[in-house]
Image (tube, grey):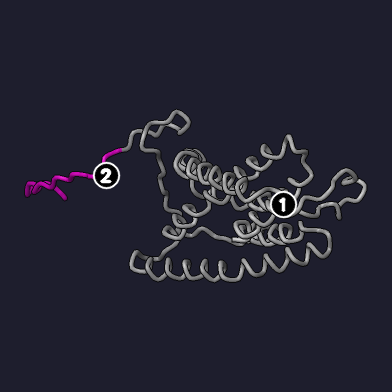
């Protein structure tokens, strides 16, 4: 949630002079991109298109190719990159600014958008019984709501402190640290219920590995009475 809160502020914040950026690094990471409200609105619209494409097209292909668990590990381990690279957009020349913005948004949507369905699938797999799913999903939704509640004021506070320190990257790097802590927890996860969840696209896709023909799940057994003179 810190990403959604900080991004419009960072886009519209006054852009600093980076002619001597490398001589004053890292304190050169000050200010934002100096975009107008209209430019930010257009960028966020394209961000929604990117997110829709990744959710509808990329997720089924990646989940079928890597599997839910391996894709989950990839998403969590790569998530710190989402926050770490954003402040460096301010150091790009104007000619490369929009390319850098859409690259960052694509990276963010890939790691963040894929995380939500993966979480739901793994929560369902880890549930001890279907009767407990309502309680577990409710607890997960409550936890997410609590994080949304505290994320915005904390991110805003850190951004304000960063402005005073001439280092607006502070809020982004704090989010990077939290993401790293989350990624380190993978080492302590034990997937006890290893049910296989199959994710596929509605249409045939050559990028998805071909599945072996499945055998029938119904087994027919015929029982006949043995003759008296035969041993059973």
Q: Nearer the viewer, residue 12 or 135?
A: 12
Neighbourhood count class around disc 1 (C-alpha, 10 Å): few under 14, some 14–19, many 20 upward: many
Q: Earlier in the sequence, mark 2 or mark 1?
A: 1
Provide residue 162's location: percent of width, then percent of height: 78, 63
Q: Residue at x 7, y 46 (%)?
A: 227
The residue wearing badge 2 is 217
Q: Residue at x 80, y 55 (%)?
A: 30
> In which quadrant of the rendered view does residue 19 lie?
top right
Any magenta on residue 44? Answer: no
Chain part drawn in magenta = 215-232
Position above or below: 198 against 5: above
> In which quadrant of the rendered view does residue 20 lie?
top right
> In which quadrant of the rendered view does residue 101 lie?
top right
Q: Secondary structure at mark 1?
A: helix
Mark 2 or 1, which is nearer the eye?
A: 1
Any magenta on residue 229? Answer: yes
- 216 horizontally vs 110: left or right: left
Q: Nearer the viewer, residue 205 or 88?
A: 88
Position above or below: 135 against 168: below
Q: Secondary structure at mark 2?
A: loop
Q: Residue at x 59, y 45 (%)?
A: 43
Neighbourhood count class around disc 2 (C-alpha, 10 Å): few under 14, some 14–19, many 20 upward: few
**On residue 98, which mark appears?**
none
Which quadrant of the figure contains the N terminus? Answer: bottom right
Q: How many marks?
A: 2
The residue wearing badge 1 is 84
**Are the residues at dot 2 and dot 1 in contact (C-beta closer than 8 Å)?**
no
In the orientation shown, which residue stands out farthest toward the right? 23
């Amino acid at each position: 949630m810190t990403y959604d809160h900080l991004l419009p502020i960072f886009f519209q914040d006054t852009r600093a002079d980076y002619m001597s950026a490398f001589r004053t690094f890292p304190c050169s990471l000050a200010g934002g991109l100096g975009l107008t409200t209209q430019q930010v609105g257009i960028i966020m619209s394209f961000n929604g298109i990117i997110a829709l494409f990744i959710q509808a097209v990329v997720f089924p292909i990646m989940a079928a190719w890597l599997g839910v668990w391996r894709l989950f590990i990839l998403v969590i381990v790569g998530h710190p990159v989402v926050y770490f690279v954003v402040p460096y957009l301010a150091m790009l020349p104007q000619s490369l600014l929009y390319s850098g913005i859409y690259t960052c948004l694509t990276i963010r949507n890939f790691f963040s958008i894929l995380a939500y369905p993966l979480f739901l699938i793994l929560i369902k797999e880890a549930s001890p019984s279907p009767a407990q799913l309502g309680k577990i999903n409710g607890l997960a939704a409550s936890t997410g709501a609590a994080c949304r509640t505290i994320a915005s004021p904390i991110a805003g506070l850190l951004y304000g402190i960063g402005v005073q320190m001439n280092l607006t990257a502070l809020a982004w790097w704090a989010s990077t640290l939290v993401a790293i802590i989350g990624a380190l927890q993978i080492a302590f996860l034990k997937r006890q219920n290893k049910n296989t969840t199959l994710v596929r696209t509605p249409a045939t896709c050559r990028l998805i590995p071909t599945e072996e023909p499945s055998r029938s799940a119904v087994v027919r057994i015929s029982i006949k009475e043995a003759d008296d003179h035969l041993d059973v």
